[in-house]
Image: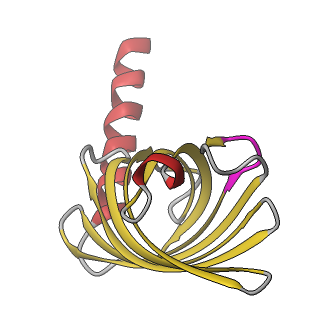
Amino acid sequence: MKKIIMGLVMALSTLTASAQFEVGKNYIGASVSGLGLSYSKQAKVNFDLSATAGRLLAENWMLLANVEYQHLDGVNIFELGVGGRYYIVQNGLYLGLGVAYAHSKYESVKSDNCFITPEIGYAFFLNQHVTIEPAIYYRMSVNDFADASTVGLKIGFGYYF
């Protein structure tokens, strides 16, 4: 009897999760990384706050736009980017890829950089709309690959509607 009940619960949870990634759904989210959760040769202190909006354009495919603020050793960096996600499994596992333009200013020196960021993450649904989304990412710098690239972990919150 326990096996039958557990089987029904698993089947129902799979059905509710698959409805989250259907065409036409919108997404907003925020994430934080840094705080010792990433590594870069250039940065000792790193804090990163990101806001993201997206829309599922096809089954399991989401288009994203994001705005990001970073604080690295006294340098403030503002970033704009676009990207996408592909939800591999209907339960929330996803692969992401993004491209971003970053502008920074330290005293009177300005700098621009471009980043390509692949990531793998998981959307844990707390209810039908709210998620906690941990992800591992590699933020590859186009301008200074060796010193400005970063590997890290970010924790995000999402809302699907």
Q: Position of residue 58 (x, y in %)?
A: 17, 72
Q: Is residue 113 above or below residue 141?
A: below
Say which of 11 and 44 sits in front. Answer: 44
The structure residue drawn at horizontal position 42% and vertical position 74%, both measured from the top left corner, is 100
| Residue 120 locus on image (x, y percent) | 38, 45
Q: Position of residue 27 (x, y in %)?
A: 46, 75
In screen coordinates, is 59 left or right of 27?
Answer: left
In this rendering, does residue 1 appear at all? no
* Vertical placement of residue 108 versus 150, above or below: below
Q: Is residue 35 magenta?
A: yes
User: Mainly helix, strand or loop, the magenta region?
Assistant: loop
- Quadrant in the rendering for residue 109: bottom right
Residue at (41%, 52%) from the top-left corner? 145
Q: Is residue 135 in view from this perspective?
A: yes
Q: Quadrant of the N terminus?
A: top left
Residue 72 position in % (x across, y down): 73, 61
The image quarter in which residue 153 lies:
top right
Q: Is residue 35 left or right of residue 17?
A: right
Residue name at image x 33 percent, y 56 percent: 96
The residue lying toward the viewer, choosing from 21 and 43, is 43
Q: Quadrant of residue 115?
A: bottom left
Extent of the magenta region? 33-37
| Display coloring | secondary structure
In percent of the image, x 61 and y 70: which residue is there? 50
The one nearer the camera, 75 or 151, is: 75
Please count the marks in the image. 0
